[in-house]
Image: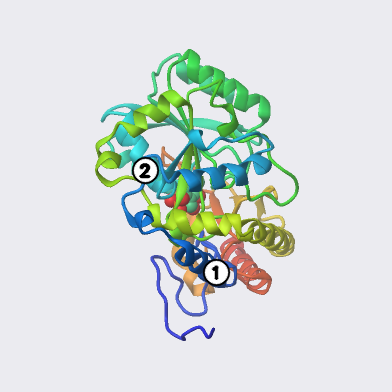
């Protein structure tokens, strides 16, 4: 079927001709219109009218079963339908969790740096963010233990695999330690596992969702990165106790499942094998883009920045010379028809000004090469005498 030619816009859409690596969304060629058509038609051809009523508060049982069947081999660990709660994606899940499990004025521990829009969700709920340092293996447990001596957080928000923005992955040992500490100090680990399945060079350590028996864990998963952000569909995996607390809330008692219709469509996508085949395509495509961006960075930014090649997810995190302020640099990036997100955005204390984040999700290889060469020109213009 022909695609209608019209302009589709979104918040933060780049001006024509600009290659903006600040955009953390898939490129058009990876958004599965045909697949959605097939899955939706399959659902509608077989739909029972009652499937258009309110959905179960926890989420449709048949969908949760299909999702559990999809996640179990991916996690190499049995996932049960009973442990899953359907959400409208991780942003909504985070907002919901803050509303249910924290009170204004509570403390939330958060990696420094972390996902900048999570900062805003915590601020919406009047929570105080306290940064915990990270290294190449993720959240530093000794730093966390030190902070636990002087704070009693309600929540700890972490992105364990292929971090946004840092790209690093929390080691297995640290995951286990974190789970244990959550029990000993009575806080909730909110593990944003949005990139857990997007691995390109080998699988990450087990999802925190597989550790709900040994810690107070809410593991957040989403179809945004493995199918399409516009679906607004995700899940929380947790223990029976925390599940009970989520089910006993006004919003689900009133409206039922957070995204019932889309969950039916996604059940069919999973059962037809379409989700798995798209995930395989995404892994191969993004792997190639990581390699392309890494090569281009070496060619155009070698000596100007340091970075680690990410093993998955969407992002490269670059550290530039100490005196560079990437917030100021961003205002000049338009002149060079390129773009990025400045490091300060990801800091809860106004630091990281000399860092920046690049996403490789929104552009193909040619644009990545071109955009990185423009970024190199921008940086070279700053270091020129
Ligand atoms: C770490 C992280 N959490 C959450 C989200 C948003 O997830 P969702 O689309 O499921 O709301 C993103 C998207 O970039 C993300 O990087």
Q: Closer to the camera, 62 or 262?
A: 62
Query: Residue 77: x percent and y percent?
Result: 66, 34
* Mark 2 / mark 1, whichever is N-terminal: 1
Query: Residue 353: x percent and y percent?
Result: 49, 47
**Marks 2 and 1, Cα distance to the nearest angstrom?**
25 Å
Q: Closer to the camera, 205 or 150?
A: 205
Q: Is residue 185 left or right of residue 280?
A: left
Residue name at image x 64 percent, y 70 percent = 364
Residue name at image x 42 percent, y 81 percent = 7
Quarter of the image for residue 135 reads top right
What residue does disc 2 label? 56
- Secondary element at tag 1: helix
**Number of residues whose C-alpha sits closer than 10 Å to that of mark 2, classed few (under 14), some (14–19) or many (20 or more):** some
In the rendered image, the quadrant that contains the C terminus is bottom right
| Residue 325 visible to the viewer | no
What residue does disc 1 label? 38
Do the residues under discs 2 and 1 have CB atoms within 8 angstroms? no
Q: Is residue 305 left or right of residue 156?
A: right
In the rendered image, the quadrant that contains the N terminus is bottom right
Query: Residue 59: x percent and y percent?
Result: 41, 44
Q: Is residue 259 left or right of residue 207?
A: left
Quarter of the image for residue 358 reads bottom right
Q: Which mark is residue 101?
A: none
**Number of residues whose C-alpha sits closer than 10 Å to that of mark 1, classed few (under 14), some (14–19) or many (20 or more):** some
């Amino acid at each position: 079927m022909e695609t209608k030619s019209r302009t589709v816009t979104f918040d933060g859409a780049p001006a024509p001709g600009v290659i903006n690596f600040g955009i953390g969304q898939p490129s058009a060629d990876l958004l599965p219109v045909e697949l959605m058509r097939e899955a939706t038609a399959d659902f509608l051809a077989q739909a029972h009218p009652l499937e258009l009523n309110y959905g179960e508060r926890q989420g449709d049982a048949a969908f949760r079963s299909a999702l559990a069947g999809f996640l179990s081999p991916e996690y190499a660990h049995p996932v049960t339908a009973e442990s899953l709660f359907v959400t409208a994606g991780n942003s909504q899940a985070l907002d919901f969790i803050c509303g249910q499990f924290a009170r204004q004025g509570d403390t939330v521990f958060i990696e420094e740096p972390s996902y900048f829009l999570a900062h805003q969700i915590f601020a919406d709920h009047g929570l105080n963010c306290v940064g915990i340092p990270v290294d190449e293996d993720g959240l530093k447990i000794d730093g966390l233990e030190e902070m636990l001596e002087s704070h009693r957080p309600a929540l700890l928000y972490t992105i364990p695999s292929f971090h946004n923005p840092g790209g690093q992955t929390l080691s297995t040992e640290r995951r286990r330690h974190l789970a244990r500490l959550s029990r000993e100090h009575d806080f909730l680990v909110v593990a944003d596992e949005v990139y857990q399945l997007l691995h390109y060079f080998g699988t990450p350590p087990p999802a925190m969702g597989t550790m709900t028996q040994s810690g107070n864990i809410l593991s957040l998963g989403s179809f945004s990165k493995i199918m399409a952000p516009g679906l607004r569909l995700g899940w929380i995996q947790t223990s029976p106790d925390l599940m009970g607390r989520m089910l006993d809330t006004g919003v689900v008692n009133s409206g039922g499942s957070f995204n019932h219709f889309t969950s039916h469509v996604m059940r069919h996508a999973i059962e037809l094998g379409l989700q798995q085949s798209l995930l395989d395509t995404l892994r191969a495509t993004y792997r190639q883009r990581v390699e392309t961006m890494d090569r281009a960075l070496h060619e155009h930014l070698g000596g100007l920045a340091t970075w680690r090649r990410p093993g998955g997810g969407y992002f490269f995190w670059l550290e530039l010379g100490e005196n560079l302020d990437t917030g100021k640099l961003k205002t000049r990036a338009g002149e060079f028809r390129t773009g990025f997100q400045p490091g300060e955005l990801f800091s809860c204390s106004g630091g990281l000004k000399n860092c920046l984040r690049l996403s490789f999700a929104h552009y193909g290889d040619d644009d990545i090469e071109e955009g990185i060469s423009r970024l190199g020109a921008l940086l070279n213009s700053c270091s020129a005498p």
